[in-house]
Image (cartoon, rainbow, N blue to C red):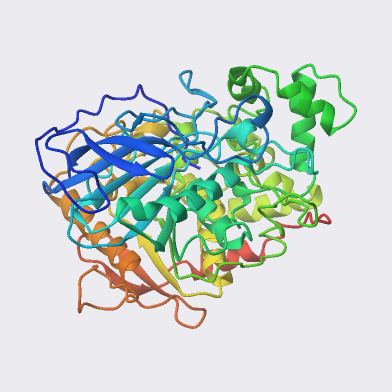
Amino acid sequence: MIVHCWITEMNIIALWSCVVFAVDMFISVGCQPVFLKTKNGVIKGRILKSRDGRPYHSYTGIPYAKPPIQRLRFMPPESAEPWNGTWDATKEPNICIQEGYVDGYEDCLYLNVYAPETDKKRLPVIFWIHGGGFTWGHSGSGLFGPAYFMDKDVVLVTINYRLGILGFLSTEDDVLPGNYGMKDQVLALRWVRENIITFNGDPDQVTICGGSAGSASVGFHMLSPMSKGLFHKAILQSGSPVCIWANCPSGVSRKRAYSVATIAGCNFNNSEDILNCLRILPAKYLQSEMHTKLFTWLKYPAILFSPVVENCKSRQEAFLCHHPIYDFQQESFVPAIIGMNSAEGGLMAIPLYNRTSLLYTEFSEDFNRLWPIISGYNFYVTPENIHKIVDKIRKKYYPSGSINDDSHSETVKMFTDSIFTKCVFEMAYQLSSPVYGYIYNYQNEFSHNKIYGSCDKPLGVTHGDEMNSLFKMNDLNPIELNEEDLKVSKLMINIWYKFVSTDIPTVDGLENSTPWSKFTQSDQSIMYVDSDRPVLIKNPYVDVYEFWKKLPITSIKKKL
């Protein structure tokens, strides 16, 4: 769900050096670049250095699917075809075309593979799914640089998938069933199963991992029959498929598809007419100009197109058969890390304020109407219940009765709990497989709040801040981590690596250390990270969860 203010892609300067690398699955070379023979053909990569100076092989922009253009627009992805000659995997992949980013491409289904030089064979694999509200984002090394993970014996895969209208438009029938972006992710997982051994990865040790909408995607894969058997562990960072913003009730996606067709000037009587019309329109028009015409207030709702329930009795392979909120059905019973940051709500609060004042007084004056729109609850709440819910929210989070110029922190807390806390813990409670919970409350020098709006007031550890510790994010923060940030970063890499590579995770990622207790209904143990010395605590959000659980929020329940 991260809504980045996109920056021009920074050039990633390769660290070239002459080496001789000969592991039996690699083609030996005397100097850079490095070549690798895959099932589809030879690829050319390069050797870079990890944070601690370890050489690793980088292959970027590998096609895993045919370009989803022309007849393949609004269709499930098809596997990439073999190529002749050598594929240049030293360039950054095309970014999927998206609202607010003029340099995107419809031809964007590529992935990146990073593998350290090591004598060990069959390394565990981390499969990273980027966030961005199913609308924005990419997998490039400018946002998700692999240097930190490459200090470990792990293969990292990052992927692009279709976004927005092109990735998730649905008329909720067999003509435009939707979920194309999710099916892209499934095809990329199948590519990993078939190809990762070539990169010294173990297809039987794949951990899917994601942040925000990428985290919700990880959760959707745990519920999807299409994804079953393709992964073995999961890490969900700040999102889940039971989050209100990650999906919507039956009928909403269909109405939005009709709105898109109407605004686009399509003459239609049925879904086939819509498909034929939208398939020939410029992708830029659909993803950028069209998207902005669908907002209700400012740029809200931020997420307009997301995963939907499909007809699993049709002849087509369906991704999602049951609505996660109304009919939670787990398909993959794998161990999972689930957690969030302590002040996630900065994502939604920061755009509404500057340092000293509320920028939009209507947020206070028309709170009953605007809060459901911003949070996404409007499609889940009946009109008669909206006023009851909003009154309770005001009393809990704004005890003075007013939302004023000094209410920054209260608004952050309100959005944190309504958009993240409730659904993150709901997922942890619902899963039948082992769950390990965490709260990330370490304030890095760089805060993602800097890109969410003009308010420069410190407002806590916000949405996306944990990724500072996991990836080199040059596009957002080219400055090297300071001493304390570096300690926490190495801690998080250790913890994540211990989880993906062993059966006994620990609170600091070290061997023979304190085991990370499982999160259960009876023992709600949470790993709390506010320094490089994490501790286990009892879930501090029990009362918050119960407050939101008791509200009649999912009071609109349609037959699915």
Where residue 354 appears, x then y in whole percent? 41, 30
Where residue 501 appears, x then y in whole percent? 31, 67
Above or below: residue 457 compared with residue 307: above
Closer to the camera, 12 or 17?
Answer: 17
Instruction: Give left or right: position of 529 versus 173.
Output: left
Residue 1 in sight from this viewpoint: yes
Res 43 quadrant in image: top left
The quadrant in which the C terminus is found is bottom right
Tally the numbered discs: 0
Residue at image coords 65%, 28%: 295
Where residue 394 appears, x then y in whole percent? 59, 50
In the current view of this chain or complex, which residue is farthest to the front?
Answer: 84
Instruction: Give left or right: position of 145 versus 309.
Output: left
Closer to the camera, 254 or 403?
Answer: 254
Residue at image coords 54%, 28%: 360
Residue at image coords 44%, 43%: 130
Above or below: residue 451 compared with residue 100: below
Instruction: Give left or right: position of 28 versus 247.
Output: left
Residue 237 in sight from this viewpoint: no
Residue at image coords 29%, 50%: 470
Above or below: residue 108 compared with residue 172: above
In the current view of this chain or complex, which residue is farthest to the bottom?
Answer: 522
Where residue 146 appears, x then y in whole percent? 27, 44
